[in-house]
Image (spheres, rainbow, N blue to C red):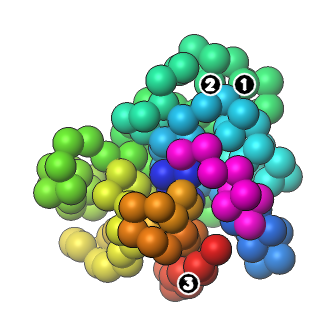
Amino acid sequence: MADSHDNLPNVEKALRIFKEAGVEAVFHLGDFVAPFTLKKVAEAEVPVYAVFGNNDGEREVLRRVATREGINLSSQPAFVEVNECTIALLHGTGTPDDTLAVVERMARSADVVLYGHTHRREAREVEGALILNPGETLGYLTGEASVALLDLETLEVEFRVL
């Protein structure tokens, strides 16, 4: 999930989808905005990996909440190993083209590159790596709120509209 921008009803919908699908980890790709949204994401009851986005202003408070809630919150880019899969986490920066250029370079260093910022969902392969943007959890910019489910064994992606 990415770009939730304090839309708590949609965060709750996303968490229900994750629970029903039996996800083993949640990745939030930045732009929680406020600490209360991060706290809501922590209710996922599975490991949560996250990076800061450009709209996450209260970073020290977000760090404290993440630590208290057991969320692995990092500056971008971040790399994590999950089920023997190297996953790069990035929010994005600058224009959509700027973000895509960085994402494509990161594909050389990971099996999966997860990113947000552009608010547009995407799943494609670059240099043998899966590039995935789940779209915006917010739903206001594109008119469609979404998240993505990723199977790390098959690298199959399923987008879900909230």
| Residue 46 locus on image (x, y percent) | 79, 54
Of the numbered discs 3 and 2, the one sitting upstream in the chain is: 2
Left or right of residue 151: residue 57: left
Q: Which residues are magenta?
A: 5-13
| Residue carrying label 1 | 65
Which label was assigned to residue 53? none
The residue at which mark 2 appears reads as: 62
Q: Which residue type does callout 3 highlight?
A: Glu
Q: Determine which quarter of the picture holds residue 153.
A: bottom right
The residue identified by callout 3 is 158
Instruction: Identify the image quadrant of the N terminus.
Output: bottom right
Residues under labels 3 and 2: Cα distance? 29 Å
Residue at the extreme top of the image, as rendered: 60
Q: Main secondary structure of the magenta part?
A: helix
Q: Residues within 10 Å of mark 2 (few under 14, many from 20)?
A: many
Secondary structure, mark 1, is helix
Badge 3, how many Cα within 10 Å: few under 14, some, many 20+? few
